[in-house]
Image: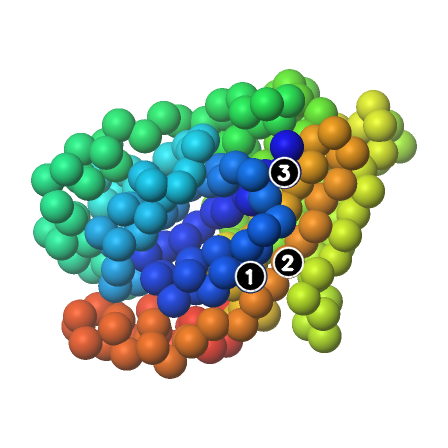
Amino acid sequence: MRYLILSDIHSNREALEAAAAHAHGLYDRVVCCGDVVGYGADPNWAIDWVRAHVGGIVRGNHDRACAGLEDLEWFNAAARASAQWTHDALTPENLRWLRDLPAGPITVDSFALLHGSPADEDEYLLSTRDAAEIAEYVERSVSFFGHTHMQGGFMLHRNGVRLLPRTPLRLQEETLQLEPDTPYLINPGSVGQPRDRDPRAAYAIYTPESRLVSFRRVKYDVQAAQEKIRSAHLPGILAERLELGA
């Protein structure tokens, strides 16, 4: 069984279509680490796609916010405006679906899905120190997370936590063979709003039987996504950052 691992789609239709096309034929099942909506201008389309194709998913903080389950005072002005706009744009059916998403971690096959960290769905895992501090909460040998919008992750080696490589800017794929009996926290990267200085849509392919992970990137029509954000009168920074990958 091969899995397409998605995270942080953020209502970006152009990026999700590009990632799905790029991964065509490489997977048998799709799972998602949350934040289907927020920031972008196609929330209903993104939810409809996920409902039709994804077989395992956890909620993200923007999913909660856009569903009306989160106090928006903790969001910055752009994120707050986007959450309010998205809430109003969602169909009643998609709003109910968003509200019913489970908190992570959940188990799929032999691995875990979560949004922030195994200890707290809103916690950011940005450094080896962050990963070391929550290592005791890791229950599966492989866990996929999102939230940071940064492809890569951590190897929780007995001799210390190590950073995982992401796809180099010059390539479309970086393949990683996972060591046996070693826990991993793996971030597939953000489909719809990368923040690792690479504007390409990010995702991963995982084969549990061989413990093989492929980090992948693909270009998409950034300008089309930007124009939709501007036409919806969402904050301009949400469009600008797409071309920067930041």
Q: Residues within 10 Å of mark 1 (few under 14, many from 20)?
A: some
Q: Amino acid at mark 2?
A: Arg
Distance, label 2 to label 3, CA atoms, is: 14 Å
Quadrant (top left/top right/bottom left/bottom right) for the N terminus: top right
At a point 68% along the width and 72% down the height, the residue shown is: 169
Describe the colour scheme in one phrase.
rainbow
At a point 67% along the width and 53% down the height, the residue shown is: 215
Q: Earlier in the sequence, mark 3 or mark 1?
A: 3
Please name the residue that numbered disc 2 is placed on: 216
152 or 133, which is in the foreground? 152
Q: Quadrant of residue 130?
A: top right
At a point 30% along the width and 62% down the height, the residue shown is: 40
Q: Quadrant of residue 218?
A: bottom right
Task: Look at the picture and state if 11 lies above or below 134.
Answer: below
At a point 53% along the width and 72% down the height, the residue shown is: 219
In the rendered image, residue 164, in percent from the top left (x then y), is placed at: 75, 49
Is there a contact, CB below 8 Å, between mark 2 and mark 1? yes
Q: Amino acid at mark 3?
A: Arg
| Residue 131: mark | none
In the rendered image, residue 74, in percent from the top left (x then y), is placed at: 30, 46
In the rendered image, residue 120, in percent from the top left (x then y), is placed at: 48, 29
Distance, label 3 to label 1, CA atoms, is: 15 Å
Q: Secondary structure at mark 2?
A: strand
Left or right placement of residue 167 versus residue 54 in this view: right
Q: Amino acid at mark 1?
A: His
Please name the residue that numbered disc 1 is placed on: 22
126 or 41, which is in the foreground? 41
Residue 88 visible somewhere in the drawing: yes
In the rendered image, residue 43, in percent from the top left (x then y), is placed at: 25, 54
Q: Secondary structure at mark 1?
A: helix
Please name the residue that numbered disc 3 is placed on: 2
**Residue placed farthest to the right in the image?**
159
